[in-house]
Amino acid sequence: MLALLNNVIGLEMCTLNVVALARSQDNEIARLRSVVADANKETKDANVKKEGIQQKAFDDVYNAHETGFNHCLWQVLHMCDVSDPSVFDINKDVHERELMLIDDISEDDAAVNVCIHDFDDVKEESNKAASNDKHLLQE
């Protein structure tokens, strides 16, 4: 009987040890979940910050290009003595000395058709285009 009692006490001790081990494992799992959650939050915060930096860089580059383009446009208007900036149409380009819609110029022709015009010819054609556009606007 004493042996049986010792066995029961031993089993109870084992059960208590298993329960204590299970509780410590539960605590460890909870701690690890907290660590993972914190790491996920830090990663998300870093990604949000990175996206913000990337968007700001994109905006800065875009604004710089737009500003540069506007400066070039103003200089061309001044050098060509064009008083009306509305003669410029971003949907058109000069192809074989004609002002054409970009969609009407094939990609192959656009890539090959790089030519240098005499500045006086460009100025004359720009003024013609300006007077034609003014005439069309008046109609």
Image (cartoon, helix red, strand yellow):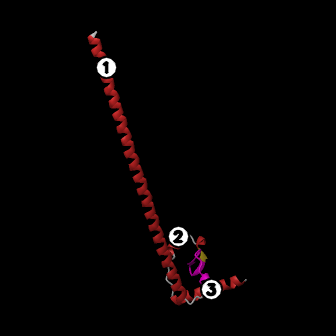
Residue at the (59%, 88%) spot, across then down: 83
Q: Which mark is residue 108?
A: 2
Q: Earlier in the sequence, mark 3 or mark 2?
A: 2
SS for callout 3: helix
Checking the image for residue 130, the label placed there is: 3
Mark 3 to mark 1: distance in Å?
102 Å
Q: Is residue 111 left or right of residue 10?
A: right
User: Relative to residue 62, is residue 125 depicted above or below?
Assistant: below
Whether residue 51 is in magenta: the answer is no
Mark in the foreground, 1 or 2: 1
Q: Residues within 10 Å of mark 2 (few under 14, many from 20)?
A: few
C-alpha span from label 1 to label 2? 88 Å
Q: Where is 36 relative to 93, above or below? A: above
Depth check: give the residue in front, 14 or 65: 14
Q: Amino acid at mark 1?
A: Leu
Q: Residue at x 69, y 82 (%)?
A: 137
Q: Nearer the viewer, mark 3 or mark 2?
A: 3
Would you say residue 24 is visible in this rendering?
yes
**Eyeballing the image, is 98 above or below 107?**
below
Q: Which residue is mark 1?
A: 11
Disc 1: CA contacts within 10 A as few (<14), some (14-19) or many (>=20): few
Pointers 3 and 2 in contact (CB under 8 A)?
A: no
Residue shown at 36%/42% (left/top)? 32
The amino acid at mark 3 is Ala
In the rendered structure, does residue 98 fall within the stretch colored magenta? Answer: yes
Q: Earlier in the sequence, mark 1 or mark 2?
A: 1
Circles 1, 2 touching at the beta carbon (< 8 Å): no
The magenta segment: 85-99
Write down the quadrant of residue 96 in the picture. Answer: bottom right
Residue 42 rendering spot, x and y as whole percentages = 40, 53
